[in-house]
Image: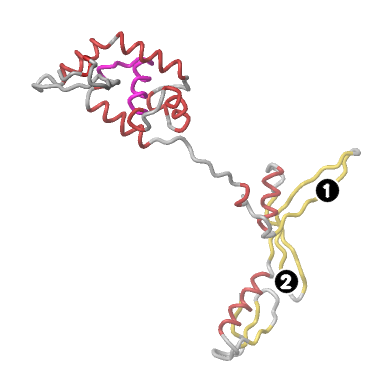
Amino acid sequence: MTKPVAGEGSGLFACYWCTQEINVNKSRELADKAEIVCYALAVMYVEEIKRVVGGKEYSSFVLRESYREGGKVRKRYIANISHLPRNEIEAIRAALRYKNPGIQKQDILQQAGPSVGALFAVVELCKRLHISEALGHSRQAALVLWLIFSRLLEQGSRLSSSRLAERHDISLLGLRPFSEDDLYGALDWLSEQQEVVQQALFKQHKATELFLYDVSSSYCEGMENELAWWG
C-alpha cells in the first residue's frame, strides 16, 4: 500500500510496509506495479514447529505472516492450525505458496451420469394415458414400462433393452439392475394379464367409438399363399 509523500501530482510514493520511496511519474501502470510489489511484502505462510518429548517427535503448525518494518523483516502469529487434518494443512500451505492450489484440473474426472430426460418423458406420458394405472405397481409392471420405453427409443432386442438400462436412470421406475431373462419374464406376465390390462385401458377411453390395434409382427409373401389374401 502506498501514500503520496511530496504533494499531489508529484509522483513520489512511500510504502506503508517498507518505507521505500517510489517514483512513479513515468506512468500510472508503474504505480500499479509498485503497489502490487508493496502488497507482496506481507506474506502469509504455514510454519511447522517440531519438538521432541520423551524421545518422540511432535509437530505443530501455525499460520504466520511476514512483513517489513523499518527495513527489517518481521513475522506475526495468525492462528494455530495443528487441529486440522494433515492433508488440509498441506492444501493451505500449497495455496499460500501459489503452487498447485486446491484441486487441479487433471485431478477431476469428468463422467456423465445416467440419462433422465427421455425416460422421464415416457413415464409421464404413460401416466397421462393411464397405461401405468392399467399395468399396476408391481416389478413386472415396471419392467413392461421399460420395454415400452426401450421400444420407442431403440427398437432392439430384449438383450439390447437390458443393456440400454445401463445408460438410463431406471430408479425412475423403481427398478434395480435386471437381465434379459427378467424382460422375457415380464412379457410372460403381460400375456397372462392381457385381458385385465385391456379392460382397464378401455374403461379410461370408453368414449372412443373405434380402436385400431395392430398386433401383427410377421408378414407373408407370394401369390399362392392363402394367408396373404386380402381380408
Q: Amino acid at mark 2?
A: Arg
Q: x, y (%) of residue 93?
A: 70, 54
Q: Nearest the camera: 211 or 229?
A: 229
The quadrant where residue 42 appears: bottom right
Q: Nearest the camera: 91 or 138?
A: 138
SS assignment at label 1: strand
Q: x, y (%) of residue 105?
A: 60, 52
**In this image, 81 relative to 179: left or right?**
right
The quadrant where residue 154 appears: top left
Please identify the quadrant where the N terminus is shown: bottom right
> Going from the N terminus, do you reach mark 2 or mark 1 first?
1
Disc 2 to disc 1, how far (Cα)?
A: 26 Å
On screen, residue 14 above or below 78: below
Q: x, y (%) of residue 174?
A: 40, 22
Residue at horizontal 69%, vertical 48%? 89
Residue 132 visible somewhere in the drawing: no
Residue at horizontal 83%, vertical 48%? 50
Residue at horizontal 36%, vertical 37%? 117
Q: Residue placed farthest to the front in the image?
A: 224
Residue 88 visible somewhere in the drawing: yes
Residue at horizontal 48%, vertical 37%? 113
What residue did someone put label 1 on? 50
Disc number at residue 68? 2
The quadrant where residue 171 appears: top left
Task: Sort mark 2 into few (<14), some (14-19) or many (20+) by Cα contacts within 10 Å.
Answer: some
The span picked out in magenta is 133-150
Q: Residue placed farthest to the top in the image?
A: 192
Q: x, y (%) of residue 86?
A: 72, 43
